Image: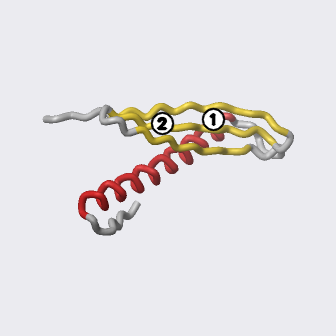
Amino acid sequence: MNEKHWTVDITIDEHTAEEGNRTRAIARLRSRDDTHIVGSGFARCNPSDHDVPEIGDELAVARALSHLARQLIEATAADLESVTHEPAHLNA
């Protein structure tokens, strides 16, 4: 079996502003073959909402991973097109 290991590192930070707390997540994909893709996601807590940081973290991370996934699909399509010389149609 030929195993490959890819790593996704996720960084979460929070900022306080007049319009409410804002959480940002950055998801970085790294592989041994030099694949490096970065996705970002944000979540904002409305000042009238209960401040539950875990919920903002979850939403920001989900959005960052979704952004990362979209970019990985786009990279895959570009790689396929460079090999086949035909348009690639991938569904997410």
Label 1, secondary structure: give it: helix
Residue at the extreme right: 18
Decide which of 34, 59 is in the foreground and name it. 34
Q: Residue at x 57, y 43 (%)?
A: 40
Q: Residue at x 48, y 36 (%)?
A: 28
Residue at the extreme left: 1
Decide which of 58, 17 is in the foreground and name it. 17
Nearer the camera: disc 1 or disc 2:
2
Three-letter amino acid code at disc 1? Glu
Q: Residue at x 43, y 34 (%)?
A: 8
Marks 2 and 1: in contact by CB < 8 Å?
no
Image quarter for residue 18? top right
Circle 2 residues within 10 Å: few <14, some 14–19, many ≥20: some
Left or right of 36? Residue 47 is right
**In the image, residue 53 lies at what x, y percent?**
68, 34
Where is mark 2, residue-wise? 28
Image quarter for residue 14? top right
**Residue 87 image label:** none
Label 2, secondary structure: give it: strand
Left or right of 49? Residue 36 is left
Reading the chain from its start, which is encountered first: label 1 or label 2? 2
**In the image, residue 63 lies at what x, y percent?**
56, 48
CA distance for labels 1 and 2: 20 Å
Three-letter amino acid code at disc 2? Arg
**In the image, residue 70 lies at what x, y percent?**
46, 54
Where is mark 1, residue-wise? 54
